Amino acid sequence: MKTVKNLKGKDFINLEDFSSDELKGLIKLAIELKKKTKNGKNLDLLKNKNLVMYFSKPSLRTRLSFEIGMAKLGGKSYVIKQDEIILGKRESIEDTARVISKHADAVTIRTFAHSDVEQFAKFSSIPVVNALTDLSHPCQIMADLLTVYETFKTFKGLKLAYIGDGNNVTNSLLTGCASFGIDITAICPNGYEPNGDEILKAKKIAEKTGSKIEITSDPVVGVQGANIVYTDVWASMGQENEAEARKEIFKNYQINNELMKNTAGNSIVLHCLPAHKGQEITEETFELHANSIFNQAENRMYAQMAILASIIK
Ligand code: CP
Ligand code: NVA
Protein backbone atom coordinates (compact mmCIF):
# COMPACT_ATOMS: atom_id res chain seq x y z
CA MET A 1 0.00 0.00 0.00
CA LYS A 2 1.44 3.37 -1.01
CA THR A 3 1.57 6.23 1.48
CA VAL A 4 1.72 9.90 0.44
CA LYS A 5 5.05 10.73 -1.24
CA ASN A 6 7.78 12.93 0.27
CA LEU A 7 6.24 13.23 3.72
CA LYS A 8 8.56 10.86 5.62
CA GLY A 9 10.03 12.61 8.64
CA LYS A 10 7.78 15.67 8.31
CA ASP A 11 5.95 17.21 11.26
CA PHE A 12 2.16 17.57 11.06
CA ILE A 13 1.73 20.81 13.01
CA ASN A 14 0.20 23.30 10.56
CA LEU A 15 -2.07 22.48 7.60
CA GLU A 16 -0.48 25.29 5.58
CA ASP A 17 2.86 23.42 5.64
CA PHE A 18 1.30 20.95 3.17
CA SER A 19 0.25 21.48 -0.43
CA SER A 20 -3.37 20.93 -1.47
CA ASP A 21 -2.24 17.82 -3.36
CA GLU A 22 -0.49 16.39 -0.30
CA LEU A 23 -3.57 16.95 1.88
CA LYS A 24 -5.82 15.45 -0.79
CA GLY A 25 -3.41 12.50 -1.01
CA LEU A 26 -3.81 11.95 2.74
CA ILE A 27 -7.62 11.95 2.40
CA LYS A 28 -7.37 9.43 -0.46
CA LEU A 29 -5.13 7.22 1.68
CA ALA A 30 -7.53 7.54 4.65
CA ILE A 31 -10.39 6.30 2.45
CA GLU A 32 -8.28 3.32 1.38
CA LEU A 33 -7.26 2.57 4.98
CA LYS A 34 -10.88 2.77 6.14
CA LYS A 35 -11.98 0.30 3.47
CA LYS A 36 -9.15 -2.14 4.20
CA THR A 37 -9.60 -1.89 7.99
CA LYS A 38 -13.36 -2.47 7.73
CA ASN A 39 -12.70 -5.51 5.50
CA GLY A 40 -10.58 -6.96 8.31
CA LYS A 41 -7.29 -6.55 6.42
CA ASN A 42 -4.13 -6.75 8.50
CA LEU A 43 -2.10 -3.62 7.85
CA ASP A 44 1.52 -3.69 8.91
CA LEU A 45 2.55 -0.26 7.66
CA LEU A 46 3.90 0.75 11.10
CA LYS A 47 5.04 -2.63 12.44
CA ASN A 48 7.52 -2.22 15.34
CA LYS A 49 6.99 1.57 15.38
CA ASN A 50 6.24 3.42 18.61
CA LEU A 51 4.15 6.54 19.11
CA VAL A 52 4.37 8.69 22.25
CA MET A 53 1.34 10.88 23.00
CA TYR A 54 1.60 13.80 25.40
CA PHE A 55 -1.57 15.45 26.77
CA SER A 56 -1.78 18.68 28.82
CA LYS A 57 -5.57 18.71 28.29
CA PRO A 58 -8.31 16.03 28.43
CA SER A 59 -9.19 13.92 25.40
CA LEU A 60 -11.49 11.09 24.39
CA ARG A 61 -11.46 11.05 20.58
CA THR A 62 -7.88 12.11 19.93
CA ARG A 63 -6.38 9.66 22.39
CA LEU A 64 -8.52 6.69 21.32
CA SER A 65 -8.24 7.31 17.59
CA PHE A 66 -4.44 7.64 17.71
CA GLU A 67 -3.98 4.64 20.02
CA ILE A 68 -6.31 2.28 18.18
CA GLY A 69 -5.21 3.59 14.76
CA MET A 70 -1.58 2.94 15.64
CA ALA A 71 -2.47 -0.61 16.80
CA LYS A 72 -4.36 -1.25 13.55
CA LEU A 73 -1.19 -0.31 11.64
CA GLY A 74 0.86 -2.80 13.66
CA GLY A 75 2.51 -0.24 15.97
CA LYS A 76 2.31 0.65 19.66
CA SER A 77 1.52 3.84 21.53
CA TYR A 78 2.29 5.25 24.96
CA VAL A 79 0.39 8.05 26.69
CA ILE A 80 2.00 10.60 29.02
CA LYS A 81 -0.33 12.98 30.82
CA GLN A 82 0.23 16.32 32.45
CA ASP A 83 -0.05 14.80 35.95
CA GLU A 84 3.11 12.79 35.17
CA ILE A 85 5.20 15.54 33.58
CA ILE A 86 4.18 19.12 32.92
CA LEU A 87 5.68 20.01 29.54
CA GLY A 88 8.46 22.55 30.07
CA LYS A 89 8.22 22.47 33.90
CA ARG A 90 9.91 19.28 35.14
CA GLU A 91 12.60 19.77 32.51
CA SER A 92 12.97 21.92 29.42
CA ILE A 93 10.93 21.28 26.28
CA GLU A 94 14.24 20.89 24.40
CA ASP A 95 15.39 18.03 26.66
CA THR A 96 11.96 16.36 26.68
CA ALA A 97 11.99 16.41 22.86
CA ARG A 98 15.48 14.91 22.69
CA VAL A 99 14.62 12.11 25.17
CA ILE A 100 11.35 11.14 23.44
CA SER A 101 13.18 11.18 20.08
CA LYS A 102 15.59 8.52 21.40
CA HIS A 103 12.76 6.13 22.23
CA ALA A 104 9.88 6.67 19.83
CA ASP A 105 9.26 7.03 16.08
CA ALA A 106 6.73 9.88 16.35
CA VAL A 107 5.10 12.03 18.99
CA THR A 108 1.70 13.72 19.28
CA ILE A 109 1.28 16.75 21.55
CA ARG A 110 -1.92 18.32 22.89
CA THR A 111 -1.20 21.45 24.88
CA PHE A 112 -2.02 25.14 25.35
CA ALA A 113 0.65 27.27 23.63
CA HIS A 114 1.17 26.50 19.94
CA SER A 115 4.72 27.83 20.31
CA ASP A 116 5.50 24.95 22.73
CA VAL A 117 4.76 22.44 19.97
CA GLU A 118 6.89 24.43 17.49
CA GLN A 119 9.68 24.60 20.08
CA PHE A 120 9.43 20.84 20.72
CA ALA A 121 9.66 20.18 16.98
CA LYS A 122 12.88 22.21 16.68
CA PHE A 123 14.63 19.78 19.02
CA SER A 124 12.85 16.58 18.01
CA SER A 125 14.42 14.25 15.48
CA ILE A 126 11.13 12.37 15.01
CA PRO A 127 7.90 13.72 13.45
CA VAL A 128 5.74 15.85 15.76
CA VAL A 129 1.95 15.86 15.34
CA ASN A 130 -0.24 18.69 16.66
CA ALA A 131 -3.04 16.96 18.60
CA LEU A 132 -4.64 20.39 19.41
CA THR A 133 -3.24 23.65 20.67
CA ASP A 134 -4.98 26.91 21.59
CA LEU A 135 -4.30 27.98 17.99
CA SER A 136 -5.20 24.98 15.85
CA HIS A 137 -6.49 21.41 15.53
CA PRO A 138 -5.30 20.14 12.13
CA CYS A 139 -5.97 16.41 12.74
CA GLN A 140 -9.62 17.21 13.46
CA ILE A 141 -9.97 19.06 10.17
CA MET A 142 -8.51 16.15 8.17
CA ALA A 143 -11.27 13.92 9.63
CA ASP A 144 -13.84 16.61 8.83
CA LEU A 145 -12.70 16.84 5.21
CA LEU A 146 -12.81 13.05 4.91
CA THR A 147 -16.42 13.16 6.18
CA VAL A 148 -17.28 15.93 3.70
CA TYR A 149 -15.83 13.90 0.82
CA GLU A 150 -17.65 10.71 1.87
CA THR A 151 -20.94 12.66 1.99
CA PHE A 152 -20.72 14.75 -1.18
CA LYS A 153 -18.17 12.70 -3.23
CA THR A 154 -16.48 15.99 -4.14
CA PHE A 155 -14.95 19.10 -2.59
CA LYS A 156 -15.99 21.30 -5.50
CA GLY A 157 -18.82 23.81 -5.21
CA LEU A 158 -19.35 23.29 -1.48
CA LYS A 159 -19.85 25.90 1.22
CA LEU A 160 -19.13 25.31 4.92
CA ALA A 161 -20.61 27.67 7.52
CA TYR A 162 -18.99 27.60 10.94
CA ILE A 163 -21.05 29.19 13.72
CA GLY A 164 -19.85 30.02 17.23
CA ASP A 165 -16.50 30.82 18.78
CA GLY A 166 -13.65 31.62 16.37
CA ASN A 167 -11.30 29.16 18.06
CA ASN A 168 -8.59 26.58 17.28
CA VAL A 169 -11.03 24.43 15.26
CA THR A 170 -12.22 27.48 13.27
CA ASN A 171 -8.64 28.56 12.53
CA SER A 172 -7.82 25.13 11.11
CA LEU A 173 -11.12 24.91 9.22
CA LEU A 174 -10.24 28.15 7.41
CA THR A 175 -6.91 26.77 6.17
CA GLY A 176 -8.33 23.31 5.49
CA CYS A 177 -11.31 24.57 3.49
CA ALA A 178 -9.08 27.02 1.58
CA SER A 179 -6.70 24.18 0.60
CA PHE A 180 -9.54 22.01 -0.65
CA GLY A 181 -11.33 24.81 -2.56
CA ILE A 182 -14.34 24.81 -0.22
CA ASP A 183 -16.01 28.18 0.47
CA ILE A 184 -16.10 28.95 4.19
CA THR A 185 -18.01 31.52 6.23
CA ALA A 186 -17.13 31.91 9.91
CA ILE A 187 -20.08 33.35 11.84
CA CYS A 188 -18.88 34.69 15.18
CA PRO A 189 -19.91 37.44 17.62
CA ASN A 190 -17.86 40.63 17.35
CA GLY A 191 -14.60 40.16 19.23
CA TYR A 192 -14.70 36.35 18.93
CA GLU A 193 -13.58 36.03 15.31
CA PRO A 194 -10.84 33.55 14.27
CA ASN A 195 -7.16 34.52 14.68
CA GLY A 196 -6.22 37.37 12.30
CA ASP A 197 -2.98 35.74 11.06
CA GLU A 198 -4.82 32.47 10.41
CA ILE A 199 -7.44 34.33 8.34
CA LEU A 200 -4.65 35.91 6.27
CA LYS A 201 -2.92 32.53 5.74
CA ALA A 202 -6.20 30.98 4.62
CA LYS A 203 -6.91 33.89 2.25
CA LYS A 204 -3.48 33.45 0.67
CA ILE A 205 -4.17 29.75 0.02
CA ALA A 206 -7.67 30.61 -1.24
CA GLU A 207 -6.18 32.91 -3.91
CA LYS A 208 -4.74 29.76 -5.53
CA THR A 209 -7.68 27.38 -5.02
CA GLY A 210 -10.51 29.86 -5.66
CA SER A 211 -12.31 29.25 -2.38
CA LYS A 212 -14.19 32.19 -0.80
CA ILE A 213 -13.46 33.11 2.82
CA GLU A 214 -15.93 35.26 4.71
CA ILE A 215 -16.26 36.37 8.31
CA THR A 216 -19.60 37.70 9.55
CA SER A 217 -21.52 38.18 12.79
CA ASP A 218 -24.92 37.46 11.20
CA PRO A 219 -25.99 33.79 11.56
CA VAL A 220 -28.91 33.90 9.10
CA VAL A 221 -26.88 35.61 6.36
CA GLY A 222 -23.82 33.41 7.07
CA VAL A 223 -25.52 30.03 6.68
CA GLN A 224 -27.29 30.91 3.38
CA GLY A 225 -26.73 28.07 0.93
CA ALA A 226 -24.32 26.18 3.23
CA ASN A 227 -23.87 22.48 2.53
CA ILE A 228 -22.04 21.88 5.80
CA VAL A 229 -22.94 23.67 9.05
CA TYR A 230 -20.29 23.23 11.75
CA THR A 231 -20.03 24.22 15.39
CA ASP A 232 -17.87 23.70 18.46
CA VAL A 233 -18.13 24.51 22.16
CA TRP A 234 -18.50 28.16 23.21
CA ALA A 235 -15.77 27.81 25.84
CA SER A 236 -12.72 25.74 24.90
CA MET A 237 -10.45 23.79 27.25
CA GLY A 238 -8.62 26.37 29.36
CA GLN A 239 -11.53 28.87 29.16
CA GLU A 240 -13.72 27.14 31.77
CA ASN A 241 -13.85 30.29 33.93
CA GLU A 242 -15.43 32.21 31.01
CA ALA A 243 -18.10 29.57 30.36
CA GLU A 244 -20.97 31.37 32.13
CA ALA A 245 -20.26 34.77 30.55
CA ARG A 246 -19.93 33.14 27.13
CA LYS A 247 -23.44 31.61 27.38
CA GLU A 248 -24.86 35.15 27.14
CA ILE A 249 -22.42 36.35 24.43
CA PHE A 250 -23.03 33.32 22.17
CA LYS A 251 -26.75 32.72 22.79
CA ASN A 252 -27.71 33.71 19.22
CA TYR A 253 -24.95 31.57 17.71
CA GLN A 254 -26.66 28.21 17.97
CA ILE A 255 -27.37 25.54 15.36
CA ASN A 256 -31.09 24.76 15.57
CA ASN A 257 -33.79 23.60 13.16
CA GLU A 258 -34.91 27.18 12.48
CA LEU A 259 -31.42 28.28 11.42
CA MET A 260 -30.99 25.12 9.30
CA LYS A 261 -33.94 26.27 7.11
CA ASN A 262 -31.58 28.85 5.54
CA THR A 263 -29.01 26.25 4.41
CA ALA A 264 -28.80 24.27 1.17
CA GLY A 265 -31.29 21.42 0.79
CA ASN A 266 -28.73 18.66 1.18
CA SER A 267 -26.91 20.16 4.16
CA ILE A 268 -25.26 18.20 6.96
CA VAL A 269 -24.21 19.27 10.45
CA LEU A 270 -20.75 18.54 11.81
CA HIS A 271 -19.42 18.97 15.36
CA CYS A 272 -15.90 18.07 16.45
CA LEU A 273 -17.29 17.06 19.90
CA PRO A 274 -17.56 17.13 22.87
CA ALA A 275 -20.97 18.83 22.45
CA HIS A 276 -22.79 21.00 24.94
CA LYS A 277 -26.37 20.40 23.83
CA GLY A 278 -28.69 23.33 24.48
CA GLN A 279 -25.77 25.72 23.94
CA GLU A 280 -24.00 25.65 20.53
CA ILE A 281 -26.52 23.12 19.15
CA THR A 282 -29.99 21.96 20.21
CA GLU A 283 -30.43 18.33 21.17
CA GLU A 284 -33.04 17.98 18.39
CA THR A 285 -30.73 19.17 15.59
CA PHE A 286 -27.82 17.18 17.02
CA GLU A 287 -29.85 13.95 16.97
CA LEU A 288 -31.13 14.64 13.43
CA HIS A 289 -27.51 14.80 12.27
CA ALA A 290 -26.02 12.24 14.65
CA ASN A 291 -25.00 9.91 11.78
CA SER A 292 -22.75 12.55 10.22
CA ILE A 293 -21.39 13.71 13.58
CA PHE A 294 -20.41 10.25 14.79
CA ASN A 295 -19.05 9.25 11.37
CA GLN A 296 -16.91 12.39 11.68
CA ALA A 297 -15.70 11.17 15.11
CA GLU A 298 -14.92 7.74 13.65
CA ASN A 299 -13.00 9.33 10.78
CA ARG A 300 -10.47 10.80 13.22
CA MET A 301 -8.85 7.37 13.25
CA TYR A 302 -8.58 6.88 9.49
CA ALA A 303 -7.35 10.42 8.83
CA GLN A 304 -4.66 10.02 11.50
CA MET A 305 -3.68 6.54 10.31
CA ALA A 306 -3.00 8.13 6.90
CA ILE A 307 -0.93 10.91 8.49
CA LEU A 308 1.10 8.56 10.71
CA ALA A 309 1.71 6.00 7.96
CA SER A 310 2.96 8.78 5.66
CA ILE A 311 5.22 10.71 8.06
CA ILE A 312 6.79 7.96 10.19
CA LYS A 313 10.10 6.77 8.68
N1 CP B 1 -12.59 16.43 18.92
C1 CP B 1 -11.62 16.13 19.79
O1 CP B 1 -10.44 16.46 19.61
O2 CP B 1 -12.03 15.39 20.87
P1 CP B 1 -11.19 15.10 22.19
O3 CP B 1 -10.94 16.41 22.85
O4 CP B 1 -12.04 14.17 23.00
O5 CP B 1 -9.88 14.46 21.79
N1 NVA C 1 -12.24 24.18 20.78
C1 NVA C 1 -12.29 22.98 21.57
C2 NVA C 1 -12.05 21.77 20.73
C3 NVA C 1 -12.17 20.46 21.46
C4 NVA C 1 -11.85 19.30 20.58
C5 NVA C 1 -11.25 23.08 22.68
O1 NVA C 1 -10.11 23.51 22.40
O2 NVA C 1 -11.55 22.72 23.82
Image (cartoon, grey):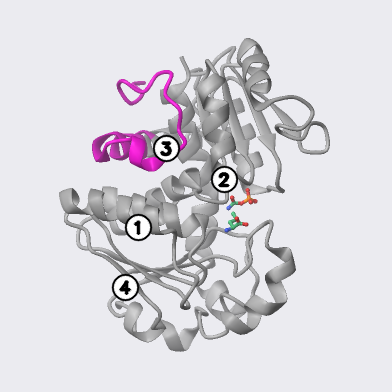
Check whether the beta carbons of the residues at disc 2 and disc 3 lie within 8 A of each other: no
Which of these two is toward me, 189 or 11? Answer: 189
Element marked by disc 2: loop
Q: Which residue is mark 2?
A: 132
Q: Is mark 3 within 8 Å of ligand 1?
A: no
In magenta, the rendered stretch is 1-29
Q: Amino acid at mark 4?
A: Ala
Q: Which residue is mark 4?
A: 226
> Marks 1 and 3, how far apart in space?
35 Å
Q: Can you tell which of label 2 and label 3 is closer to the viewer?
A: 2
Q: Which residue is mark 3?
A: 35
Q: Is mark 2 within 8 Å of ligand 1?
A: yes
- The residue shown at (63%, 10%) is 102
Per the rendering, the mark at residue 95 is none
Per the rendering, the mark at residue 199 is 1
Q: Can you tell which of label 3 and label 4 is closer to the viewer?
A: 4
> Marks 2 and 3, how far apart in space?
27 Å
Percent coordinates x, y for residue 278 in the rendering: 64, 80
- Figure quarter occupied by ligand 2: bottom right
The part of the image, by quadrant, that contains residue 2 is top left
Element marked by disc 1: helix
Q: Can you tell which of label 4 and label 2 is closer to the viewer?
A: 2
